[in-house]
Amino acid sequence: MNKIKFYEELYASCSYIVARRKSIVLPILIIVAGIVLPLLSTILLSGEQFDNVNSVVILIGIAIAITGGILLLGRLSGKGEPYHTKSGKFLTTRTLAYDRSRRSEVLKAMGSGDINALLSIPTCEVSALCLLLTTLKDNSFAAAQLFEYAELEYRELSRVTVIKG
């Protein structure tokens, strides 16, 4: 099950789905907060009685700044995430697992383009059939591809199917 290939096929089939990186404003604000927090602590809490508090605040500030740095690196690297240009929102991707006996039911729901019918099919813990599903939060747009686990690999059972809810 190759998500990168799935995304590439989705970008090729829908002109309004593009790869876009998320904003870097939030990670930068987190880094700034991690730097400013210890500075404010040392300015506001000066004196010998606050040495332990300042040490803890400096440690927390370093952890916050490192977290922001990791988020920033994540947002600056890679090709981006699927973005729906008409609604201006990022898509979320999840994997649904089905029993092998539900194969025709899942393929029928995908073929009919009914996202509600697809989501109403009972899932299971065993991933004999896996549905890679990318949707908007309100399910007004969805794209899916069905895979079957056989011989130690996931094999495509369908092409990337665009479903409108």
Image (spheres, rainbow, N blue to C red):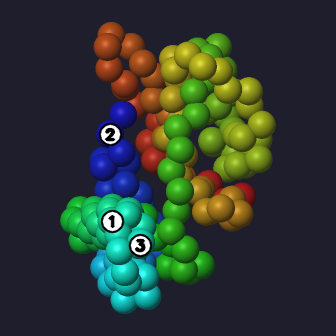
| Position of 4 relative to 158 (above/below) | below
Q: Residue at x 72, y 48 (%)?
A: 114
**Disc 1 and disc 2: Cα gap in Å?**
46 Å
Q: Horizontal and vertical percent for residue 79? A: 26, 65
Secondary structure under the numbered disc 2 in the rendered image: loop
Label 2 Cα neighbours within 10 Å, binned few <14 / some 14-19 / many ≥20: few
Q: Horizontal and vertical percent for residue 50? A: 41, 72
Relative horizontal placement of residue 42, taking residue 15 as reference (left or right): left
Q: Which residue carries the number 3 mark?
A: 50
Q: Which residue carries the number 1 mark?
A: 55
| Position of 76 relative to 44 (above/below) | above
Q: Earlier in the sequence, mark 1 or mark 2?
A: 2
Q: Which residue carries the number 2 mark?
A: 2
Q: Horizontal and vertical percent for residue 85? A: 50, 79
Residue 59 at least partly seen: yes
Label 1 Cα neighbours within 10 Å, binned few <14 / some 14-19 / many ≥20: some
